[in-house]
Amino acid sequence: MDTGEPTVTTSDSTPTTEVPAEHNPLSRRKFLQAAGATALLPLASKGLGLGKAFSDVRFANSSKGAIKLWASTFGTGAENTLCAALSKHWGYNGYTCNYSQIPGDFYEVIEAALAANKGPAVADGWAYVGFQYADEGAIYYCDNIVETYKKNGVYDDYLGNGSFFTALRNSEGQVGIPWGVDTRILWYNEVLLKKAGAAVPTDWPSYLAACKALKKIGVYGYVTSANATNSSFGTHTVATFMVNNGGGLYDAEGNVDIMNPRNVEAMEFLHELVVDGYVDPGSISYTDSDTYSEMKAGRTAMTLSIATLPTAAGTSYTAGPLYVMSPLAGPHGDKGTIQYLKNMQMYKNNPNVEATEQLLMWYNDQYAGPNGFFAKNLTASVPIRKSVIALPQIQSNPAMVKIVKEWVPVAHSEGWLDPHEFSGLAVVDDAPQMIKFAESILSGDPVVPALKAFQAWAEPYSAKYKA
C-alpha cells in the first residue's frame, strides 16, 4: 500500500499532512489507517468539553502507574514529537500516560498485544474494528463516559440526537466514543461542466445527462479506484449507490441483503454508466491517488471521494474548480452515501478504570475547541460536534459547511438499516471479495451474477457473526 504522506493544504493557507481514506486492504485482520486520528495537541477546555472532569486532570509525575494510549499514526517529524511530549504531562489521580504512535497495520499490532496481555488501555480505531475486539472480550465498555457526557452537555453537543453513540453500541454496552466521521462525497469540476453545457446533477437522470454532455467534449463523467492493492473508492462507489437508492449490504435485522432489488437497480445504473463509456476505464486499476490526479488534470469531471479532495488534488476549496455536489436523489427519492464513524475504545487490561476513562475523555476533547484537531486542520475527517462545526475555522471552509449540512445527515454505514454496527461489517467492508465485486461492475459484467457471488460469500458475516 502507498503510505506516503505529502505535505498539502486543508484550507487555502494552512499546511498539514494529508491522510488517506479509511478502508480495509486484503484481509479482515488488516485495516488501512483512518483519516485523521493521529496527534495530541495542548488544548484548554473551553466551551463544551470535559468541564469539571477536565479540571481534575493534573500535571504530575507519579509512580502509581501509566495508562497506555495508542494512536494510529500518519504524522511525521515535529507532529509526532509534539504528541510524545504532550503525553508526558498528562496525569490523573497519580496515574500518567504512556503514549505510543503505532505504525503500519494498527489492527494486527493491537491484536498481537492483546494476546500477550500487553495491549493498550485506550486506543483510537477504524470504524467497525472495536466490535471485533468486543467480540473477543477485550473491550471495557464506555457506558460511564456516556453518562458523564449526558450530564456535562457533551452528549448534546453531538449531531444526530444520539445516533452516533447508538451506532457504537452492542448488546453489552457502549463499545466506543465517536469523534468524527469519514464521509464519502460527490465532487464535480465546475469548469468542465460549464464547458460541456451541463447542469450540476441533482438526481440520477441529470447525472446521466451530464455524463453524456461531458463525453461530447472528450471528458469522462466519473472516475474511481478499484486497484486490488491500494484502493477504496471503487468499493465505496458501489456501496454508496446502493445506500443512495435506499439499499445497503444488510437489512434492518443485520442479515446480509446484497440481492435487495434496490441494490440491483443501483448496480444497473452504474453498469449503464460503464457500458456507455462515461466511466474512466482506468478506474479498474487506479489507486486512490490516481483518482486525485485525474480530477486535478481535468480528464474526469466527477468522483466520489473524501471530504478533503481539493487538498488531495492540490486545488483550492474557494477558488475551485472542484466543488461539493449536493446529494443525488435516487429514482425513488432516496438520498444517501456511506461514511465511517471515527471512534476511540477502552480495554480491560488497564491499571485503573477511572483514570482510563479520564484519559479517553481528554483525548476525545483534543478534537474540540479553538485549538483542537479540527480547528488546526490536522484531520481529514468531518466534525460531528456542534461546537466544533460553529468554529470560524470550519465555517470559513464552504466545502466542509456544505458537507456537514447536506451530506452527514444522509450518510450511513453499509449496514445502516440496522442502527448498530457489528463485526461482520469489518469483515465485508473492502474485503477482496468486495473489491472483486466492484471490479465486475466497473468492467461492465452482468450485474445479477456479480451480486449473487458477493451475496454468497458475505452470508456468514451478518450481525450474528462473532470475530
Image (cartoon, rainbow, N blue to C red):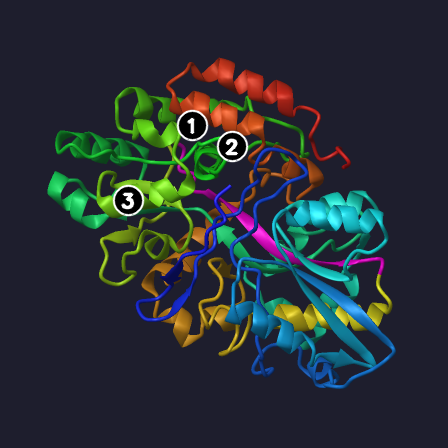
Q: Residue at x 40, y 46 (%)?
A: 305
Instruction: Say which of 377 and 278 sits in front.
Output: 377
Residue position for label 1 = 266
Q: Is residue 425 above or below residue 275?
A: below
Who comes first in sequence, dot 2 or dot 1?
2
Q: Amino acid at mark 1?
A: Ala
Residue 255 placement (x, y as % from top left): 67, 29
Instruction: Say which of 260 and 83 sits in front.
Output: 83
Residue 326 placement (x, y as % from top left): 34, 49
Residue at the extreme front:
77
Instruction: Say which of 12 and 402 sits in front.
Output: 12
Q: Quadrant of residue 196?
A: top left
Question: Start and end of the magenta stretch?
Answer: 332-349
The dominant secondary structure in magenta is strand
What quarter of the picture does the C terminus occupy? top right
Who comes first in sequence, dot 2 or dot 3?
2
Q: Is residue 215 above or below residue 56?
A: above
Residue position for label 3 = 295
Who comes first in sequence, dot 3 or dot 1?
1
**Could you classify mark 2 by the number of other residues whose Cα lies within 10 Å: few (under 14), some (14-19), or many (20 or more)?**
many
Q: Residue at x 28, y 53 (%)?
A: 323
> CA separation, marks 2 and 1?
9 Å
Task: Classify residue 201 as left or right of residue 149.
Answer: left
Contact between marks 3 and 1 (CB within 8 A): the answer is no
Residue position for label 2 = 247
Residue 222 placement (x, y as % from top left): 30, 35
Q: Amino acid at mark 2?
A: Gly
